[in-house]
Image (spheres, rainbow, N blue to C red):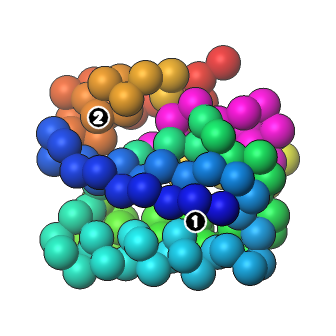
Amino acid sequence: MKIETHRRDGVATVVVSGDVDSRDKSQVGDAVRALLAQGETRFIFDFEKVTYLGSSGVSCLVSVRRDAVARSGAIAVLNPPAIIRKVFRTLGLEKEFPVYATRDEAVMALTGALPAKGPAR
């Protein structure tokens, strides 16, 4: 798994590629907690290149979302593959992790310029 973080337009983007499983979940959590410690509260998870999201990875995302929301923040997901969308749908996490097709759309939703929505179809 590989993680990159970028900040722009008042939103932190966490680009994740590869498998997110029990071995790698702490890397995602650590990256986001470091950003939270620096005052970031709005996050886009770019999952376009995620190939697997295990239960440990989902648990980590739920925890990260809880931490962001506790600081009046929010989370959006960008371009996850169909298998990741299916995981969110199966677990009933679509509202907590809205999916957007473009970064601009996600930024607008997170910054209030666009109403939040459900998952992209």
Q: Is residue 35 left or right of residue 3?
A: left
Residue count near mark 2 (Cα–Cα under 10 Å), binned few <14, some 14–19, many ≥20: many
Task: Give coordinates of residue 116: x percent, y percent.
Answer: 39, 33
Q: Is residue 95 left or right of residue 89?
A: left
Q: Quadrant of the N terminus?
A: bottom right
Residue 105 is drawn in which quadrant? top left
Name the element at disc 2.
helix
Q: Which residue is mark 1?
A: 61
Labels 1 and 2: the sequence-earlier one: 1
Query: What residue sits 45% from the left and 80% below the top?
Result: 30
Q: Amino acid at mark 2?
A: Val
- Residue range corresponding to the magenta coloring: 75-88
Q: Tell which of 3 and 8 is nearer to you.
A: 3
Q: Is residue 90 above or below residue 69?
A: above
User: In the image, what residue occupies the spot 64% across and 75% down?
Assistant: 25
- Say whether residue 1 is left or right of residue 15: right
Name which residue type carries label 1.
Leu
User: Who is closer to the viewer here, 46 or 121?
Assistant: 46
Q: Which residue is mark 2?
A: 107
Name the residue at 26% across, 62% down: 41
What percent of the width, then of the height, locates residue 111?
21, 39
In 3D space, how far apart are the residues under numbered discs 1 and 2 (Cα atoms)? 19 Å
User: Who is closer to the viewer here, 55 or 116?
Assistant: 55
Residue visible at 55% across and 47% down in the picture: 97
Quarter in which the C terminus is drawn: top right
- Write down the quadrant of residue 120 in the picture: top right
Callout 1: 10 Å neighbours few (<14), some, many (20+)? some
Residue 18 as seen in the image, left or right of residue 26 = right
Relative to 37, say whether 48 is above or below: above
